[in-house]
Image: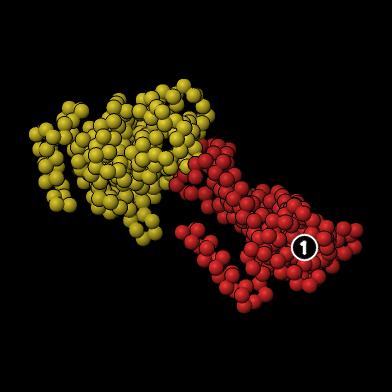
Chain colours: A yellow, B red
Amino acid sequence: MALTVEGLKKSYGNLKVLDGVTFNVEESEFVCLIGESGCGKTTILKIIAGLERPDEGRVNFEGVSRVGFVFQDDRLLPWKTVYGNIQFALKAMGVGDEEVVRRIIDFVGLKGFEDYYPKQLSGGMRQRVGIARALTVDPDLLLMDEPFANLDARTRERMQEELLRYTKGKTAVFVTHSIDEAVYLADRIVVLSPRPARVVRTVEVNLPKPRDRASQEFAEFRRELYRSLDLHGK
Amino acid sequence: MRLRGAILLTFLWYLISAFTDLPLPHEVAETFFILLFNSEPVLGKTLVQHAAASLFRVLTASLLAFSIAIPLGIVSAWNRSLTEIVMPMVEALRPIPPLAWIPLAYVIFAPLPNTVQVSQIFIVFVGAFFPCFVSVFDYSRNVPEELLEMARVFRAPERLILRDIVLPHSLQGVMSGVRIGLGVGWMSIIAAEMIATSGEGLGYFILVMYEVGGRTAEIVAGMAMIGTVGYFMNWLLLKAERLVMPWR
């Protein structure tokens, strides 16, 4: 087990956000957390990343020393180039290996854009830099907070396809409110209730990857999930 | 559009000149271009020499002001107890226009052999200091929380956060602080030069042209020179900003 999340509770003042969230992530598993906007998904990720403390409950890691994080808004440093932004994560770890940065830039298809500033890039490209930054540290655990929420539909699908290639074999927690996205990406889906969040159920997605969105099985799985979650027409 | 604006302005100028003592635009233009490189007989200096004298004072005083305002702005923004000491002083002194310091400055610095020079530098210092300090302070204090959070996620050490996030963000405040500070400094020197005999300088030139009998063409030519220098100073600094901060 790479990650165990046990009974997380969290309130902001009188607003109860998490009400005992428990789930786990196996090594090399891609887990999607889905739930409505504002249900506390981001808070869960922040607690895992150590940015916030839970009021109750705990997070256990096993064999995780490096965490990579991809944010919903790209959070790139406006004054750094693509290269500099990716290198930042390495420098934070105390290494500045140029070779690693170059390789990652190649890997995520940013070659030729090394010297561009974030302002000069499209939303999809910026998010790709964000992913590259998280990957450079060679994370044992990759946390992603709705990274494609602000992209147009076509770019979003393309980025999902790419993400699966980049994260092959990685342990990942991916937050989204899109069932479609979760069914496409996840090995397992953890379904959260509306605020305050609890885990309603977990669903194994036993479709072989890469998945074909247009296939019969995909459509059926999706429909099943929609029906069981009673989220039709949402 | 710009051209139309310029034509309208010239037309209005002619119209107003017809009814007042305002000199005609072409008279001013002629005086301006002659005096640019030919000395005007009363003071024996060209407009360029006057401008250079004023500019030299502004640059000296502003550099002095910036070299204190910039580090003080950054440090005060990052140290809460220093904020509490510095900010009340700044807030108390900032609303006083630099021009209000002029009479006091000339009295305080009277014992010095070069009272006029020192007073003028002091006044420009006051003018340039506050806008620069406030700009640097504001930017340094408001480093985007999301970026700091990103840095924490990647476990960036304090030194890296300071170097790669806090300083570049503060740099934006430094650049606009320098630009605004110089602008205010430039206005201050003109006023300061009008109070005391300083031998040269655009403010002094205008004043003398008034005192020797309202030579309006010279006065407006001097005003035009003030505007021109101010404009180019701002333009140059905007260029510099783009050079120093290519990401903007």
Task: Report whether A159 appears left or right of B158.
Answer: left
Asked which quadrant contains residue B200, the reply is bottom right
- Seen from the viewer's position, the closer of residues A93 and A110 is A110
Instruction: Using the image, determine if residue A151 lies above or below residue B88.
Output: above
Instruction: Using the image, determine if residue A130 lies above or below residue B87.
Output: above
Label 1 neighbour load within 10 Å: few <14, some 14-19, many 20+: many
- Seen from the viewer's position, the closer of residues B178 and B81 is B178
The residue under label 1 is B205
Rendered-image quadrant of the N terminus of chain A: top left
Instruction: Using the image, determine if residue B226 lies above or below residue B162.
Output: below
Q: Residue at x 39, y 59 (%)?
A: A13
- Seen from the viewer's position, the closer of residues A166 and A182 is A166
Q: Residue at x 90, y 58 (%)?
A: B113
Asked if residue B130 can be seen in this view, the reply is: no
Task: Report whether A153 appears left or right of B156.
Answer: left
The residue most toward the top is: A99
Task: Report whether A143 appears left or right of B89.
Answer: left
How many numbered marks appear? 1
Q: Residue at x 64, y 68 (%)?
A: B24
The residue most toward the bottom is: B19
- Seen from the viewer's position, the closer of residues A22 and B92 is B92
Residue B23's spot in the image, x, y percent? 67, 69
Residue B232's spot in the image, x, y percent? 63, 52
Instruction: Using the image, determine if residue B14 lies above or below residue B57.
Output: below
Task: Report whether A104 appears left or right of B38.
Answer: left
Asked if residue A121 can be seen in this view, the reply is: yes
Residue B70's spot in the image, x, y percent? 66, 50
Residue B201's spot in the image, x, y percent? 77, 58
Q: Chain of mark 1?
A: B
Give the residue type that dot 1 points to.
Phe
SS of the residue under disc 1 = helix
Q: Residue at x 75, y 69 (%)?
A: B215
